[in-house]
Amino acid sequence: MAKISRKITDDPYGALILIRRLVMEQATAYWRRYLLAFALMAVSAGTTAGAAYLLGEVINQAYVDKNVRGIAILSGVTLVIFILKGAATYGHTVILSQISNAILANNQRRLFAKLMTESIGFFSERHSSEFLARLNAGATSVTQVLSLLINAIGRDLLSLIALVTVMLMQDPYMALFGFLIAPPAMLILRKLVRRIKGLARTQFTGTADIMETMQESLQGIRTVKAFTLEQTMQERMEASITAVERNANKMAKVSNRSSPLMETLGGFAIAGSLMYGGYRVVAMGATPGQFFSFLTAFLLAYEPAKRLARLNIDLNSSLIGAQMLLEIVDSPASEPNDDDKPALKLNEARVELRDVSFRYRANENVLNHMSFVAEPGRVTALVGPSGGGKSTVLALLLRLYDINEGDITIDGQSITAVSRRSLRQQTAYVGQDVYLFRGSIFDNIAFGKVGATEDEIIAAAKAACAHDFIMGFPLGYQTPVGEHGAQLSGGQRQRVAIARALVKNAPIILLDEATAALDSESEKSVQEAIEHLCQNRTTIVIAHRLHTIMHADAILVVEGGEIVERGRHDDLLRQNGRYASFFRLQHRDASPLAPLDASA
């Protein structure tokens, strides 16, 4: 017994523990409404049993007593009973639906809030479709589990008790005969539960695969079309759908194996009851009303009994989805709330990296003891080959990741000693891959500052050289941007992003290849917008196009996670080192260059 108990309690997502947890954490908050629903279910169960009992009385009044007045009275009572049953059924169904909707909404909020506490590293290890599946299937499964439990106890069990009471009142021996089907049914159903668990988990992961393929195909539709990958993506989708279909068919076979079992056993019980009950009426003088009342109660009890017999199968199927939700909710937050830390207070916005090392994976340093200072109100540019660690520097400054060694300070305050929120509120970021949210241009600029006024948004758009093209749209600032900003060009998206950064009015600006994907005309407009953005702000910019940072106050050449050269544009050209080599390479085909010597 002790061994069995340990086995049950050791698994935090075991069926019994999970059910208890869902009831205690999610159902108890609605206990008053559940109590009302139970009361209405009791009324529904009582009226069902009452109708079965009255049927026997009606039969006796008609065929034994031949009492027309008694039949009329019982008919009226039956009408009242069914009206009560309809009202009670409506009431408890609506109440339970409202509770289920509230629990579903709370779990969706809960999961999304938990995801907002996770770090970039957490998401980089998973596909976004997994979270969509957990959000939809997981939250829905919680309500299904609770609904199954409540309906099993309140509807099915109460109805069964009431109907069994009628059966016992009419004929106890015949009732006991009907109960003989229960033990073999329970024994066989128990063996199906373990198989259902494995199939339900496979079904969840298969559904996530379908969502993943769909999401990637639609978001990458340009690439799909450009590389004629339609057939390839259809084959991937076909494989995922076929696997889910095959698993669903297996699940249908296993979960419904109980139906022929219950029907066969029920057939034996009903046939035996008919024979025994008919014999009592014919040979032993029992009233036909007693026989019909028992038979009606028995037939009405059959459906709730069948649902209760299947309860274990249905519960374990739904518990898999609930487990998928709780696994995310229960996991420690990889970016926990640290608002209890002091807020970052800026005077000059002087940014300094001191001997900083960082690695995404063990023994693979991306930054190696990097040190530099971004002076207040000046532009510091990071240049160098891809993979050198430039974008990682910006990610560390935003604390999307935490450093492994060294320290990063702003005005002498370590960024790990202040709250992330205050750090990010003082920083504006514009990346190469601009992300625009669903909504209008106005909405996307307003995301930069909560409560920004219309005048502030228009002023930011003008400074970002975006106002003119925005007003060229029929809807102006209310123009929808489409999914990921697909209805705007690359240059337009960049300028909206810069306007979003401008309206934030942050003292520290981080620019990651903000013009890399633009044509020359768009780049000129965006570059002008960036100049407005960077005025009197501490700016750290990453650039592959070196002509965009020629006037930077400091240029750092980053290779292999280290700074190999530093200085201004002219100084670095005179050194004739790595920067000069990059500069020659980029301008070799653009225009003839004068010799790069000390007089350059």
Image: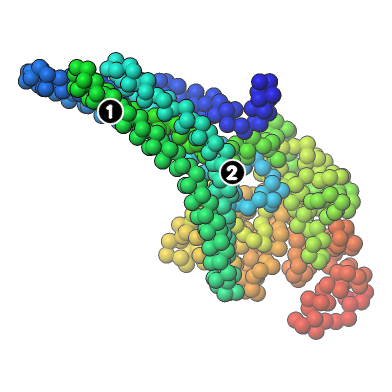
How packed mark 1 is, by other alpha carbons closer than 10 Å (few <14, some 14-19, many 20 or more), is few
Local secondary structure at mark 2: helix
* Disc 2/disc 1 C-alpha distance (Å): 43 Å
* Disc 1 target residue: 275
Quadrant containing the C terminus is: bottom right
Quadrant in the picture for the N terminus: top right
Q: Position of residue 333 (x, y in %)?
A: 68, 38
Query: 600 or 482, which lies in front?
Result: 482
Quarter occupied by residue 171: top left
Q: Nearer the viewer, residue 395 or 539?
A: 395
Residue 430 to residue 204: above or below: below
Amino acid carrying mark 2 in the image: Gly
What residue is disc 2 on?
198
Q: Residue 11's spot in the image, x, y percent?
A: 66, 31
Q: Residue at x 85, y 53 (%)?
A: 365
- Which of the two labelled residues, at mark 2 and mark 1, occupies the earlier sequence position? 2
Say which element carries label 1. Answer: helix
Q: Nearer the viewer, residue 332 or 43?
A: 43
The 10 Å Cα crowd at callout 2, few under 14, some 14 to 19, many 20 or more, is some
Q: Nearer the observer, disc 2 or disc 1?
A: 1
**Residue at far front of view:** 283
Q: Residue at x 66, y 50 (%)?
A: 126
- Residue at (31%, 32%) from the top-left corner? 271
